[in-house]
Image (cartoon, grey):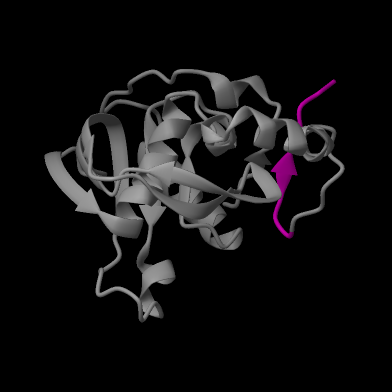
Amino acid sequence: MILPIVAFGDNVLKKHCTEINKEYPNLDKLIDNMFATMDNANGVGLAAPQIGLPIRLFIIDSTIMLEDNDETDEVGLEEVFINAKMIEETGEEWAFEEGCLSIPEIRENVFRKPNIKIEYYDADWNFKTMEFSGLTARVIQHEYDHIEGILFTDHLKPLKKQLLRKRLSRISEGKVHPDYRMRFPKH
């Protein structure tokens, strides 16, 4: 089932999310719905807060963005991250234009470190400690931020945030029309 994506301005996007356990109700169905929702919106990642759930769960699929990219030999990843914990981020920060399904029509350069080490449980509750780099690491960092209550706009310099204020207000007021379902904050 395709779920509505929570828009900028909803408090759930600013919450530090809580861990879940194997008994979390209908987890497999939730994960399937998250992939369907992400695919429907042409996204490469989706975190549970973006569908209104303040839990430490996110999914990514970086295969799409990497399959036609001649600039890198990086292989993409489709994965479920449950109760993730970032262990380290290393390397010299680099800029890349990011967007977010919860913040449609806005894309900005965000600086992130290129290499990460992260612990998490996969969809089968296998505990993993993995290292990622490049664009896949960036997608993971972006989605990980969501479960920490951080949006990509929080990484921008104050002047850039000020310049985006009106556009962000339009999103929270429901004055945008992406080609996927959204849930806008109640004012």
In screen coordinates, is 78 left or right of 155? left
Q: Quadrant of the C terminus?
A: top right
Percent coordinates x, y for residue 81 in the rendering: 30, 40
**Front residue of this view, candidates 151 and 19:** 151
Q: Is residue 91 above or below residue 83?
A: below
Which segment is the magenta one? 179-187
Percent coordinates x, y for residue 167 in the rendering: 80, 40
Q: Is residue 109 above or below residue 64?
A: above
In screen coordinates, is 60 left or right of 170? left
**Front residue of this view, candidates 148 and 107:** 107
For the point 20% across and 44% down, the residue is: 124
In screen coordinates, is 181 left or right of 94? right
Percent coordinates x, y for residue 115 in the rendering: 23, 47
State the predominant SS element of the stretch in magenta.
loop
In the rendered image, residue 159 lying in the magenta stretch gets the answer no
For the point 66% across and 43% down, the residue is: 103
Percent coordinates x, y for residue 16 in the rendering: 45, 18
In the rendered image, residue 180 lying in the magenta stretch gets the answer yes
